[in-house]
Image (cartoon, rainbow, N blue to C red):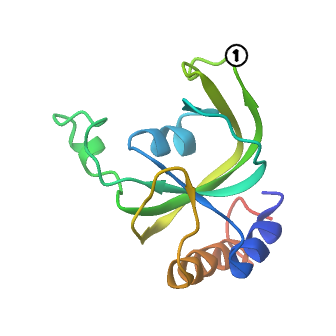
Amino acid sequence: MAGLSELLAKVEAGTVKALSIKQPYPHHIFHDGKDVENRDWPTKGRGWFLIHAGVSKSELDKDDAAEMAMPRGGIVGAARIVDCVTDMDSMWFFGKYGFVLRDAFPLPLVPCRGMLGFFAPDAEVTAQVAAHIRAALSPGAQGHE
């Protein structure tokens, strides 16, 4: 995937922000083609961000064992924001604002506390995220640069 080296450099420098998204939506971003994150507020930010899966179970189907097993309570992947729109031809768009997403990919869970809005994960978390991205970039890793 193009841009992973750029993402790694930004994570190592501590300049990539994270955004909390309740499961199952991170799963849908990584596996089901969810191409927009709906919000009540706009962003001028563009580029890579880390996806934090909140601990809340409020959006999960509590009778669905697979949904209940989805990772929560930490960084679970990354994506790029390429636009912020008020209308979009996507089955996933229903918000006042939509952050248009590209190049999303999952990572193993890196536990950390989420916050409202975009936030800067601490150095220990970013070091673990960087290690996962570095592993994805290593020779033999599938589907990356």
Q: Is residue 66 above or below residue 128?
A: above
Extreme residue in the left direction: 63
| Quadrant (top left, top right, bottom left, bottom right) of the C terminus | bottom right
Q: x and y percent of residue 98 in the render?
A: 64, 29
Q: Is residue 32 above or below residue 120?
A: above
Q: x and y percent of residue 23 in the render?
A: 38, 44
> Looking at the image, which residue is at 53% across and 34% down?
32
In the visual, does 17 lie left or right of 7?
Answer: left
Q: Is residue 93 above or below residue 17?
A: above
> Looking at the image, which residue is at 58% across and 17% down?
91
Q: Is residue 145 above or below residue 79?
A: below
Q: Secondary structure at mark 1?
A: loop
In the visual, does 44 lie left or right of 113?
Answer: right
Question: Based on the displayed image, in which of its 4 quarters is residue 13 positioned?
Answer: bottom right
Instruction: Out of 106 and 12, give the one closest to the viewer.
Output: 12
Q: x and y percent of residue 63 in the render?
A: 16, 34
Q: x and y percent of residue 36 in the render?
A: 63, 32
| Quadrant (top left, top right, bottom left, bottom right) of the N terminus | bottom right
Question: Based on the displayed image, in which of its 4 quarters is residue 40 positioned?
Answer: top right
Instruction: Out of 91 and 39, give the one closest to the viewer.
Output: 39
> Looking at the image, which residue is at 70% across and 41% down?
43
Badge 1, how many Cα within 10 Å: few under 14, some, many 20+? Answer: few
In the visual, does 19 lie left or right of 90?
Answer: left
Identify the residue under disc 1.
Answer: 87
Kind of residue at disc 1: Asp
Tally the marks. 1
